[in-house]
Structure formats: structure tokens, C-alpha cells
């Protein structure tokens, strides 16, 4: 038989079974997800808590720490864990957030300005976050507004 190629059934099955592996090994990993929009609210809340501590407002510091903790919990819940990675969203246990050192000489006026800015920041995000996050972000905005009102 002239022109006949010797393909065995076993060879064809082996080639078909290993083809997806070759493709999977050569595709680049997906790009990392963009930073969560709530990250900035967490940083702001931690900064405000440190400023409140320096200004001698422990109740405000506790409230802003609670805001930061709730926002961090939502970010951690929404971020998928990837085994074997040390990047955010990895399977490594969540680390304790670094505590912000209280700024020296924080004043009540600085704290009020920071709380107003945080209220505006959170209120600005309400319309752009997914519906399941609206309540949390709106609660942070309302909490900042009530802290401003209580301090005024």
C-alpha cells in the first residue's frame, strides 16, 4: 500500500487527549483583578480612626475602625481565593491590618474635615457600586454624617 500513513488508534487517542494540556500550558495567566473600589474607603476609615484617637475622640475612632473592618470583610468576601498565590485574593490567611499610627497633634477641626471628606467619598460611590454593596457603602456615608453631626 503506497501512500498509506501509519496512524494507530492509540496514537490518535493520545494526541487528542494531550492537546488540551498543550494549550493550557501555553496560555498566559489572566491579569490580576483591578483594585476593589472599597479599598480607598478602608484606608480613609483607618486614617480617620487614627486621627480621632489623636484628637481624643475614642467613640469616633471606634466607629471608623468598625467601618474599616466591615468594608475589609466585604472586600475579602468578594475576592476569590487562589491556591498557591501570595497576592491579594490568595489562600494565605488574612493578615491583621497595619494599625495607623496616630498623627501628632490631631485636632477636632482636622477630624471633622476628614469625616466630611469620607462622607462625600462614600456617598459618591453609592451610585456606582453593585446593588449588593449599596447598603454597606451608604451606611458608611450615613455613619460619617452622624459622626460629624455629633461632633458639631
Image (tube, rainbow, N blue to C red):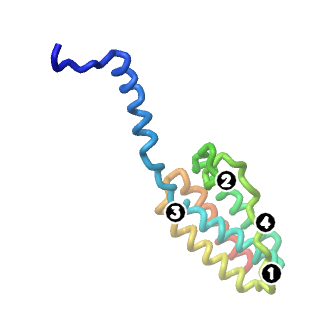
Asked if residue 146 is positioned above or below residue 73 in the image, the reply reads: below
Give the mark, 4 or 2, whose residue is nearer the N terminus: 4
Q: Residues under labels 3 and 2: Cα distance?
A: 18 Å
Asked if residue 37 is positioned above or below residue 49 in the image, the reply reads: above
Q: Is residue 14 left or right of residue 107?
A: left
User: Which mark, residue 55?
Assistant: 1
Secondary structure beneath dot 1 equals loop
Asked if residue 107 is positioned above or below residue 134 in the image, the reply reads: below
Q: Quadrant of residue 84?
A: top right
Q: Position of residue 58 (x, y in %)?
A: 82, 71
Which quadrant holds the C terminus?
bottom right
Give the mark, 2 or 1, whose residue is nearer the N terminus: 1
Q: Residue at x 17, y 13 (%)?
A: 1
Label 1 packing within 10 angstroms: few (<14), some (14-19), many (20+)? many
Q: Residues under labels 4 and 2: Cα distance?
A: 16 Å
Q: Are marks 1 and 4 in contact (CB under 8 Å)?
A: no
Q: Is residue 105 left or right of residue 114?
A: right
Residue topped by disc 2? 73
User: Which mark, residue 126?
Assistant: 3
Q: Residues under labels 3 and 4: Cα distance?
A: 23 Å
Q: Residues under labels 1 and 3: Cα distance?
A: 29 Å
Label 4 packing within 10 angstroms: few (<14), some (14-19), many (20+)? some
Secondary structure beneath dot 3 equals helix
Q: Position of residue 71 (x, y in %)?
A: 65, 58
Q: Nearer the viewer, mark 4 or mark 2?
A: 2
The residue closer to the viewer here, 86 or 28, is 28
Amino acid at each position: 500500500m503506497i501512500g498509506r500513513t501509519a496512524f494507530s488508534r492509540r496514537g490518535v487517542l493520545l494526541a487528542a487527549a494531550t492537546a488540551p494540556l498543550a494549550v493550557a500550558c501555553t496560555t498566559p495567566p489572566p491579569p490580576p483583578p483591578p483594585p476593589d473600589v472599597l479599598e480607598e474607603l478602608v484606608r480613609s476609615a483607618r486614617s480617620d480612626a487614627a486621627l480621632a484617637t489623636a484628637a481624643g475622640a475614642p467613640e469616633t475612632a471606634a466607629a471608623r475602625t468598625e467601618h474599616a473592618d466591615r468594608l475589609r470583610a466585604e472586600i475579602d468576601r468578594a475576592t476569590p481565593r487562589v491556591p498557591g498565590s501570595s497576592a491579594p485574593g490568595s489562600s494565605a490567611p488574612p493578615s491583621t491590618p497595619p494599625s495607623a499610627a496616630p498623627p501628632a497633634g490631631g485636632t477636632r477641626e482636622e477630624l471633622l474635615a476628614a469625616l466630611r471628606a469620607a462622607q462625600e467619598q462614600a456617598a459618591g460611590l453609592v451610585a456606582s457600586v453593585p446593588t449588593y454593596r449599596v447598603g454597606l457603602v451608604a451606611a458608611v456615608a450615613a455613619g460619617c454624617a452622624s459622626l460629624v453631626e455629633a461632633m458639631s
